[in-house]
Amino acid sequence: MINLSIRQMADMLTTKQISVQELNGVYHDRARQFNDRTNALISVYEELCAREVMQAQDLLGKAAHPLAGIPLIHKDLFCTRGQTTTCGSNMLEHFIPPYDATVVSRLSAAGMITHGKANMDEFAMGSSNEHSAYGPVANPWDLSRVPGGSSGGSAAAVAARMTPVATGTDTGGSIRQPAALCGITGIKPSYGRVSRYGMVAFASSLDQGGVLAPAADDCGLVLSAMSGHDPLDSTSARRPGWAWQKPESADLTGVKVGVIQDWVDGLQDEAIKQLTLQAIETLKAQGASLIDIHLPHADLAVSAYYVLAPAECSSNLSRFDGVRFGHQTAQAQNLEDLYRRSRSEGFGEEVKRRIMIGTWALSSGYYDAYYLKAQKIRRLISDDFRQAFDQCHVLACPVSPELAFKHGEKADGVSMYQADQFTIPASLAGLPCLSMPIGHAAGLPVGLQLIGRYYDEQSILAVADQYQQLTRHHLQVPEAFL
Amino acid sequence: MSINRKELEEIATLAQLHIPEQQVSQITDSLNQVMGMIEHINGAQTSGVEPMAHPHEGWQQWREDVVTDQSHKTALLKLAAHADEDHYLVPKVIE
């Protein structure tokens, strides 16, 4: 049951081989059973889940959406009406939104069953899921190691098959890196593909909602249902609707795959390098032609990102003033003191650090030298990608330079920030990108990143699906969670 | 680029954050570490390059200038730690 694809589950539901209640009972029990070990979930729903199960069962007799009755976990930064939305922060410990995020309402309208909310790095800032007010998440492949972040709870929940699919968000790699470290597939769509309405903002020009699931086909089905223009978000693109088309065969003839060879050659971990080369060779064996691609400005991406993202974060998080919502201090002497103490008590250390970096970068005297300079570098990186896509249909490269590391191993922020060196460039350009599992090294999963042209999610999902038609890495489940 | 204690206090004031005395040194070091990493961008040749603020630059979506939302005063005031029927309540501002 736990390795059925979403298509197979949907087929079993419509042909009445299984009821919505039975299917969701399996995952509900697994979520409850394994959360002690993984800490992947901040909340597990009982009443809401039971209500949605009844509604979905009724829907199935009619013209139901193909996702009706399929279990789902949301990252805990998507607003859920009447249900706590913490963002992994003490600041929002008691925050109960009065509305649903568009992603939530669209997937609910499709009949998906929400089982709960996933743990995450506070306000989506982190690459290890150690920065959560609700405790660190454990990687199901090795509980002493991190699952990646910030969508680490979503990734761990899928890897342990506590849910067949989860939503996540990606600002600089927060879907792809945890997907890679947990051995599942995760897609960040093009900026503008998915509405950000009701998605608590970190860096507004970079944040994008996406999907984590075992297979590319699962991701494509769910991403199709949550995509599309939303009048409530002016940055969601007014484009025709998009529906994932699963390829009929694994033949990649005619597909030009650009390999970012510098990144592969630069991998320090020999096992990751070999698996990456093997996966690329498999694509070639499937008929793809390989082209060597060089992105001359990509080595500036991490530094530029840590100017731009904190700058946007310092602006976005200024809304948390302790007055209108969120944590309020009990010790304020006056209004100024109330702001400062509420924010200092409510935010964790990593969030405060990024707010201060961003405040500094935007302050008088540094704006031109750092913020504007970083925006120019963003242009150079975006132009690098544009030129690369004159030569190929998709790009292939590593996701993470290292395997899942031990909890507490990266105490300083800068070494943690470097974990996103291969994921940040595509984020700065707003391009669709995904991670797919390509094998294990020392018992830990490794991912390959595919990057597509703007609004061409279809191509990267198709290549991933075609690779997965011939391989079984995406179907591996940690032994302790079978 | 690095900051000292005085500059840290200025940044904290702008960011509306309170920094306990015992954390000043650690936070200063931590910010300086990040700033050292950011320094890398200074070596890049960017003269004549247009800044890129957003993947959707160059177009802004317009909508009709009509009211589409209703008042949610009650629901929103319920989210506050302290509020009466019409106002958010904060410590006294004017002595």
Image (cartoon, rainbow, N blue to C red):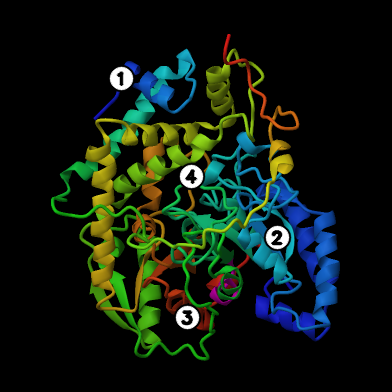
Of residues A249 and B35, which is closer to you in this image? B35
Q: What residue would you read off at disc 3?
A: A462
Q: Are the residues flagged by discs 2 and 4 from a single subunit?
A: yes
* Residue at horizontal 64 percent and vertical 30 percent from the top: A327
**Of pointers 2 and 4, the one earlier in the residue sequence:** 4
Q: Secondary structure at mark 1?
A: loop
Indicate left or right for A313 with A373 as reference.
right
The chain to which mark 4 is attached is: A
Q: What residue would you read off at disc 4?
A: A126
Q: Secondary structure at mark 2?
A: loop
Of residues A130 and A146, which is closer to you in this image? A130
Q: Which of label 1 and label 2 is nearer to you?
A: 1
Q: Examine the structure image and report whether residue A215 is included in the region drawn in magenta.
A: yes
Q: Are the residues flagged by discs 3 and 1 from a single subunit?
A: no
Say few, some or many: other residues with alpha carbon within 10 Å of mark 3 (under 14 / 14 to 19 / 20 or more): many
Q: Which of label 2 and label 4 is nearer to you?
A: 4
State how many labels appear.
4
Q: Which of label 1 and label 4 is nearer to you?
A: 1
Residue type at mark 1 is: Asn
Residue B8, x across and y down, in percent: 36, 22
- Reply above or below: A341 against A191: above
Q: Give the Cα distance between marks 3 and 2.
A: 26 Å
Q: What residue would you read off at disc 2?
A: A162
Residue type at mark 3 is: Ala
